[in-house]
């Protein structure tokens, strides 16, 4: 990735942060700045861990807005171009009058680095980036978000903890090209474990926050 690509990623993260902050503060504008800071930390932690894990397997992780391309089961049932879904949280919170928060707004692509593509010997005998690799990037990122959520709870940042847990719960939903789909495609058993863990964490958060 060059400087221009990093600039685009930063712009995507900032815009996503503002959109979700507006979404969760729809009924209470006084939490906007706290929500914005919370989502910024959530995104930075999540994306950084994905990039670190990606670096360890010689790949580049590129973050972008979630897009919707396929709308049916047939391969020819799709839009001409992927449809950006950054507007969905605002539309849903508007129609539900602040009741429903849609938090999945970012997705990521994984591209093998030149070193991985040309490697023939050593630790990595296979140069293909598998669904297993891609899924673990998402899993470790969500684990990091949970660790930060616990830290936020201990330090008294309840809003940050709540938003982190909601983000984790939403992230395991297998929809489109979101993190949950990447985990599911790597194995149903793996996704089942992660989904169950996320729901247990969500119930815990709802009980104490």
Image (spheres, rainbow, N blue to C red):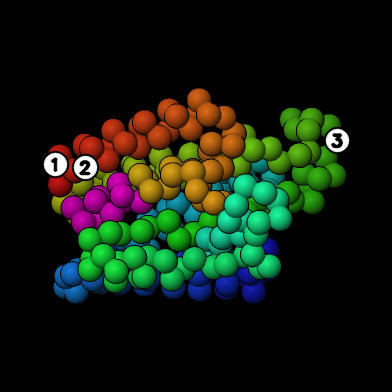
Which residue is at 68% across, 67% downward?
A: 80
Which residue is at 58% across, 56% downward?
A: 71
Is label 3 in contact with label 1 (beta carbons under 8 Å)?
Answer: no
Give the left or right position of residue 47, taking residue 103 as reference.
right
Gap between marks 2 and 1, in whole Å? 5 Å
Give the left or right position of residue 47, taking residue 203 as reference.
right
Is label 2 in contact with label 1 (beta carbons under 8 Å)?
Answer: yes
Residue at numbered disc 3: 120
Residue at numbered disc 1: 208
Which residue is at 45% across, 29% downward?
A: 192
Which quadrant holds the N terminus? bottom right
Is label 2 in contact with label 3 (beta carbons under 8 Å)?
Answer: no
Which residue is at 60% across, 42% downward?
A: 134
Image coordinates of residue 90 in percent, x first then y, are: 35, 70
Image coordinates of residue 77 in percent, x first then y, are: 66, 56
Image coordinates of residue 42 in percent, x first then y, are: 37, 56
Residue at numbered disc 2: 205
Q: Is residue 186 visible?
A: yes
Does 2 appear above or below 108?
below
* Mark positioned earlier in the residue sequence (3 or 1): 3
The reply to whether the magenta stretch includes residue 92 is no
Gap between marks 2 and 3, in whole Å? 47 Å
Q: Is residue 154 visible?
A: no
The circle drawn on residue 50 is none
State which mark lies toward you, 3 or 1.
1
Instruction: Please identify the quarter of the rendering in which residue 133 is found.
Output: top right
């Amino acid at each position: 990735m060059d400087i221009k690509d990093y600039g685009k990623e930063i712009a995507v993260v900032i815009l996503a942060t503002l959109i979700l902050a507006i979404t969760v503060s729809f009924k209470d504008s006084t939490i906007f700045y706290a929500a914005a800071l919370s989502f910024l930390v959530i995104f930075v932690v999540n994306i950084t861990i994905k990039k670190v894990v990606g670096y360890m397997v010689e790949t580049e992780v590129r973050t972008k807005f979630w897009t919707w391309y396929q709308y049916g089961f047939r391969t020819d049932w799709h839009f001409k171009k992927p449809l950006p879904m950054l507007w969905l949280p605002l539309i849903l919170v508007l129609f539900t009058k602040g009741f429903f928060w849609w938090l999945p707004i970012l997705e990521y692509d994984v591209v093998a680095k030149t070193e991985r593509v040309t490697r023939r010997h050593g630790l990595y005998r296979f140069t293909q980036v598998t669904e297993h690799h891609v899924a673990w990037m998402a899993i470790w990122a969500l684990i990091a978000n949970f660790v930060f959520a616990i830290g936020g709870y201990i330090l008294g940042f309840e809003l940050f903890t709540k938003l982190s847990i909601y983000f984790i719960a939403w992230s395991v939903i297998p929809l489109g090209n979101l993190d949950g789909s990447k985990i599911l495609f790597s194995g149903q058993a793996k996704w089942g474990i992660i989904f169950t863990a996320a729901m247990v964490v969500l119930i815990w958060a709802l009980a104490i926050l």
